[in-house]
Amino acid sequence: MLHCLLRRGCSPLLCLCLWTLLLPLVSLHQLDQHGRRSHSVRERPKLLLVSFDGFRCDYIDRVPTPNFNILIREGVMVEHVENAYITKTLPNHYSLVTGLYAETHGIVANEMYDPALNRSFSMETDSIYDSRWWEEAVPLWVTVQKAGGRSGAAMWPGSDVKIHGMFPNKYLPYNASVSFESRVERVIEWFSAPKEEAVDFGVLYWEEPDESGHKYGPQSSFMDRVIVEIDEKLGFLINELKKAGLYEKVNLIVTSDHGMTQLFADNIIELDEYVERDLYTWVDKSPVVGILPKEGKLDEVYNKLVDANPNMMVYKKEEIPEHFHYRHNVRIMPIIIEAKEGWTIVQNRSGPFMLGNHGYDNTLHSMQPVFVARGPAFRQNYVTTSMHSVDLYPLMCHILSIPPRPNNGSLLNVKDLLYPEPTAPAPTIPPRVQEYSYAPVVGSFLGVVMVLGFLVVYIRQVTLRQLPSLKHRSREMSQPLLQEDLHL
């Protein structure tokens, strides 16, 4: 602008005056524009939650796991995670993304019966896609989308079900034959998409080491190789995030739904030895079995079972220990039987036998999952002792900067995992409430004063040059003339 004024014949002094006047105003405009622009383009926080089904907390100490160790060194680790009762796949995966115990979110087992719906549910049938089973809670991907964000889900239990009228923005219908690497590649695509299409929150599920744990048992030496393979898959994920330029942007949480314990062929409890089958309906499988007595047979069935075998606990629904948070839902059967660790409950021995299982008391070390995390929100090289799996939900909401729905977790229990928020020094003057600084306004005022001063000098010099006779007048005569001229 200064160059243009000079070309149009303005004197350098006048140009300088005008530039001095306009500069603070330009600065004010730029600050205002900058403030709005920085707010509008501020990137949403990114979070990817990964579950390796059945990964016990102590697996990472069993064999070398260099990629898990990278995350621990660059981030955080929780040594003991108490997951939700019962320690099975669907209840815990839904607890992770709702922050609710099973009695509240309604997915109380892998197999259920709802007397209000008069329907049965099994993770092995298409009943899993009936929205009514899932809508007692709101999963995080729905909350993210209602808050204006975007989500993506790769095979996470329940993510291919329309819950409260929504699917994730991007999702893969469950297909166990899709490789882990393919799932990762899709998730990376979702996070790397153009800004208006990129996801902010992603969930990724992998079936191992759960399947091998059931087949071989966690004490099998074969599991060493399975754990190594899981670590290699984690390494693949890390490398793909780096290649996409996401590794330093995405907060990565790696956890599981439960652990695994060893079973033995001699540790079998056969219910047929204690109660006739025509007195009850069997709901869900060992180690926590739901018993639905036939009408009027509750006390009879309970009395036959309560002291039948010292290796199982038998509860009426209202007697289930409070710390399990497993009473207050119609899908919890009137009687539940819980096997002690390492024992299996069957009706008879005709069915298949597994060498490993989960579902037991959630305070058992063998049932506790792994938990490591790293990213811009997390501290580095930090290990803490314990948390509850329901605490993960408010933690994720905090990272994503969205308000959590009512939940059973507590952010205070896990806030030490995060970088401490900077504490501002105590102000010496009352804080200003204006959005922008006063500096541009003050600068404008000073600029005006300077311009007026320059104009006085400039007009005086011009006037003196054009009226040479005034040079001989007294200062008392010239001063009123200048003042009068300034007020024209």
Image (spheres, rainbow, N blue to C red):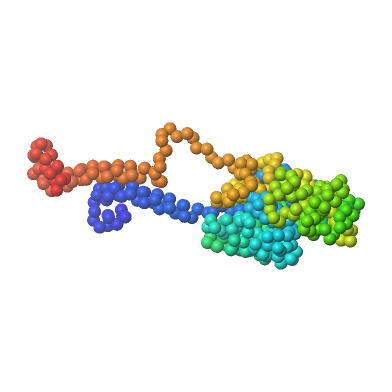
Residue beneath the point at 41% across and 46% down: 435
Residue beneath the point at 59% across and 61% down: 164
Quarter of the rendering containing residue 385: top right
Q: In this view, does 455 lie to the left or right of 217?
A: left
Q: Camera-side residue: 37 or 2? A: 37
Which percent across, then down, holds residue 124? 75, 64
Q: In this rendering, does residue 246 appear at all?
A: no
| Image quarter (top left, top right, bottom left or bottom right) of the N terminus | bottom left
Q: Camera-side residue: 54 or 333? A: 333
Q: Is residue 36 left or right of residue 69?
A: left
Residue beneath the point at 74% across and 54% down: 333
Q: Is residue 285 left or right of residue 150?
A: right
Which percent across, then down, holds residue 441? 33, 44
Residue extending farthest right: 266
Q: Is residue 115 left or right of residue 202?
A: right
Residue extending farthest top: 428
Residue beneath the point at 80% across and 48% down: 314
Which percent across, then down, holds residue 392? 64, 48
